[in-house]
Amino acid sequence: MTTSIQKNLVKRNERYHSMFKHGDLPIPPAKKYAVVTCMDARIDPATAFGINLGDAHVIRNAGGNAQDSLRSLVISEQLLGTNEILLIKHTGCGMMTFKNEDIHAVVDTQLGSEAKAELAGMDFQPFPHLEDGVRDDVEFLKKSKAIPDSVTISGWVYEIESGKVRQVV
């Protein structure tokens, strides 16, 4: 069964495909940087952060989490030549609204004991304070032996309400 989401994908892609002229872009990002940001649907990284197709790697996950991004960042730097990381969290992030025990209880209630057992001990890495979350993730990356000291790392907040970014660290 094809869903309306799948139909929209095909329809929108047909339009995109008909105008596509970037099939010759190289694999490494042209501007040699990576962005780690949240998967929040209210953020359009290309538009909000001025990223053209082929410029940068954009790594998205819940909360714009550095630990979850480490695998991708190592590949980005070691195999594809990036030398800068912009870590960008945002106001109104859902990761600031719960604690680990809350999501574990939801999993148990909604998905059952097998899912609870599968995720037992998982740190969903919520953070109660936005700027502290940015600082903590930048510190994690700077202390990581998997990220060379030569890589420039900065931490930012994107304001959902205004569309503005501001540097934290």
Image (cartoon, rainbow, N blue to C red):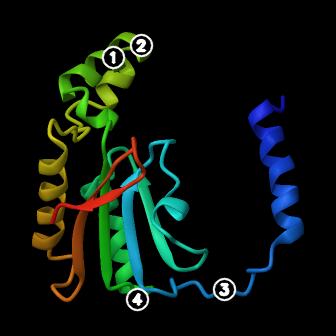
- Measured in 3D between alpha carbons, the distance from the residue under mark 3 to the one under mark 1, in whole angstroms, is 43 Å
- Work out whether 152 lies above or below 169: below
Location of the N terminus by quadrant is top right
Which residue is identified by label 2? 110
Question: Between disc 2 and disc 3, whose residue precedes?
Answer: 3
Cα separation between marks 1 and 4: 41 Å
Q: Quadrant of residue 2?
A: top right
Q: CA distance from mark 2 to mark 1?
A: 6 Å
Image mark for residue 25: 3
User: Distance of mark 3 from mark 4, alpha carbons?
Assistant: 15 Å
Quadrant of res 82: bottom left
| Residue 91 locus on image (x, y percent) | 30, 42
Residue at position x 20%, y 89% from top?
150
Give the mark toward the camera: 4 or 2. 4
Query: 169 and 4: which one is in front?
Result: 169
Q: Which residue is mark 4?
A: 81
- Measure the C-alpha gap from mark 4 to mark 2: 43 Å
Which of the two discs, 1 and 4, labels the residue nearer the N terminus?
Answer: 4
Residue kind at label 3, given as amino acid type? Leu
The three-letter amino acid code for the residue at tag 4 is: Gly
**Which element type, helix, strand or loop, lies under badge 4?**
loop
Q: Which mark is residue 106?
A: 1
Q: Amino acid at mark 2?
A: Gln
